[in-house]
């Protein structure tokens, strides 16, 4: 009986120990200067979570792990949220930098006015300061995201927290300035990469469907998201009207007509291969 109880205890304790080890590798579990560590909100997630989820990061064929925690500066009250996501280094991670950059661009890929590149202790990071502040960078296949809310922009920046996490997870972003991200060449490259990525996403979802690893409903939903971006970008930057195609795709969606959508996708990929080398004009 005692042996059985020890085995049960070990089974219960193992996930807790594993979680603690994960925290140690990713999260700073102590106060940082005047910022007080709040261990209770610390969480770990598997799957498509983390800051790049809004960019439709693909992880259906693997599990990324995200750790989150919070620090508090008592006076003035200022909560700092920290998120560290470990990506697996698989095929999807080829787009990590692009997807991270997506957070600071508008729908059509142009950088927001508040988007800046900053160098802190020799590390290049992406940042905005509007309604608070957001700081993000890559450390190999890890994504670090730090944010706080300050609608009046009267609170101090949590640079102590940013510096501490840079020491733990040094940035591997290439040196780049705020001017660099706004050059015509950079913006045009990002736009073309987004078109490439959207068609790539369609192929990734289709492959998972063919392997019986996702449902037709999820496939159609994700097709619709990425094809919509493709058509809108093609209209804006290549002058090809999207109206009829968007209406056709909506009709196929309503009828669960996967065959017609896949036929259209093949048409779009053929068009892109023939036109991706052409120049585009920025607004």
Image (cartoon, rainbow, N blue to C red):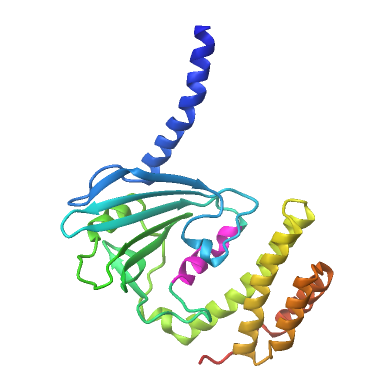
Figure quadrant of residue 274 = bottom right
Is residue 247 toward the left or the right of residue 225 in the image? right
Asked if residue 96 is among those painted magenta in the image, a careful observer would answer: yes
Is residue 150 toward the left or the right of residue 216 in the image? left
Q: Position of residue 8 (x, y in %)?
A: 52, 19
Q: Position of residue 185 (x, y in %)?
A: 50, 84
- Residue visible at 32% across and 74% down? 130
Between residue 50 and residue 89, name the one nearer to us: 50
Q: Position of residue 205 (x, y in %)?
A: 70, 61
Q: Position of residue 45 (x, y in %)?
A: 49, 47
- Residue visible at 21% across and 51% down? 35
- Looking at the image, is 50 positioned above or below residue 27? below
Asked if residue 262 is among those painted magenta in the image, a careful observer would answer: no
- Looking at the image, is 139 positioned above or below residue 25? below
Q: Residue furthest left?
A: 75
- Residue visible at 42% across and 83% down? 182
- Looking at the image, is 19 positioned above or below residue 231? above
Q: Residue furthest right?
A: 259
Query: Please, what is the dominant secondary structure of the magenta stretch?
Result: helix
Residue range in magenta is 92-103
Q: Residue furthest top?
A: 1
- Residue visible at 50% across and 13% down? 5
């Amino acid at each position: 009986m005692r042996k059985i109880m020890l085995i049960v205890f070990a089974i219960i304790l193992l996930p807790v120990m594993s979680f603690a080890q994960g925290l140690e590798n990713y999260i700073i579990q102590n106060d940082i200067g005047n910022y007080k560590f709040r261990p209770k909100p610390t969480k770990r997630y598997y799957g498509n979570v983390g800051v790049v989820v809004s960019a439709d990061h693909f992880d259906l064929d693997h599990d990324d792990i995200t750790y989150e925690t919070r620090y508090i500066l008592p006076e003035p009250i200022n909560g700092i949220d920290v998120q560290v996501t470990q990506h697996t280094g698989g095929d999807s991670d080829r787009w990590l930098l692009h997807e991270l950059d997506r957070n600071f661009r508008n729908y059509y890929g142009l950088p927001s006015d508040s988007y800046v590149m900053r160098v802190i202790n020799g590390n290049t990071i992406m940042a905005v300061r509007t309604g608070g502040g957001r700081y993000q960078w890559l450390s190999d296949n890890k994504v670090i995201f730090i944010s706080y809310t300050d609608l009046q922009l009267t609170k101090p920046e949590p640079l102590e927290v940013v510096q501490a996490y840079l020491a733990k997870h040094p940035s591997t972003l290439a040196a780049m300035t705020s001017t660099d991200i706004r050059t015509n060449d950079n913006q045009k490259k990002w736009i073309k990469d987004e078109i490439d990525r959207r068609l790539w996403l369609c192929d990734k979802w289709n492959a998972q469907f063919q392997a019986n690893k996702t449902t037709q409903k999820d496939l159609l939903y994700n097709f619709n998201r990425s094809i919509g971006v493709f058509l809108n970008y093609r209209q804006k930057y290549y002058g090809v009207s999207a109206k009829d195609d968007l209406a056709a795709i909506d009709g196929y969606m309503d009828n669960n007509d996967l065959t017609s959508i896949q036929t259209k996708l093949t048409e779009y990929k053929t068009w892109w291969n023939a036109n991706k080398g052409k120049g585009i004009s920025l607004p």
